[in-house]
Amino acid sequence: MNSGVMFNTLLILFLLWIVFRRFFPLHGVKQITTADLKSEAENKDKQFIDVRTSYEFCTRHIKGFKNIPLSILPRQTHQLSKDKDVFVICQSGMSSVKASKILKKHGFKNITNIKGGMNTWY
């Protein structure tokens, strides 16, 4: 195999890995829709966080969600209990995946990402 073919093969594998990591669910994090969230939102034993900016949160948010912007989440995990389920929402579902990764790194076990985020809340 010549070096050009080897390089192209490695490049394709790397790009596939990036796509897989970006668009497929994080291992150990549950995924639900906003329709599924409606039945969960009343549960007082669960924690609900919105990782959008404070401005986005003030503009429109779901009752019962606490605003902890993604940019400060790593420094604010002490506000959450590791013993309770954590539900994470953002605007589209991408930042909440990043937030879920942060929570996993900080030792949280029961994390649920809301797919589609506020864009799909009605």
Image (tube, rainbow, N blue to C red):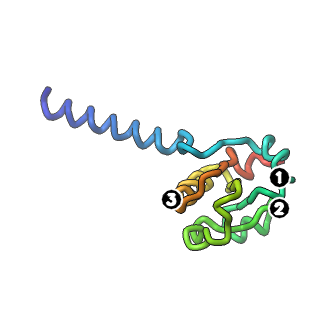
The answer to whether the residues at label 1 and label 2 have Cβ atoms under 8 Å apart is yes
Give how far apart the Cα atoms at labels 1 and 2 are.
Answer: 7 Å
Rendering coords of residue 108 (x, y %): 59, 57
Which residue is at a point 33% across and 35% down the rendered structure image? 13
- Name the side, left or right, on which 44 lies relative to 78: right
How many numbered tags mark residues here?
3
Mark 3 or mark 1: whose residue is earlier in sequence: 1
Residue 67 or 108: which is nearer the viewer?
A: 108
Q: Looking at this rendering, what residue extends furthest in the left direction?
A: 2
The answer to whether the residues at label 3 and label 1 have Cβ atoms under 8 Å apart is no
Residue 55 or 103: which is nearer the viewer?
A: 103
Q: Amino acid at mark 3?
A: Lys
Residue 12 position by quadrant: top left
Q: Amino acid at mark 1?
A: Ala
Rendering coords of residue 85 (x, y %): 70, 54
On-image quarter of the N terminus: top left
Rendering coords of residue 42 (x, y %): 86, 53
Q: Looking at this rendering, what residue extends furthest in the top direction?
A: 1
Which residue is denoted by mark 2 in the rendering? Answer: 64
Tell me the element at label 2.
loop
Which residue is denoted by mark 1 in the rendering? Answer: 41
Q: Amino acid at mark 2?
A: Gly
Tell me the element at label 3.
helix
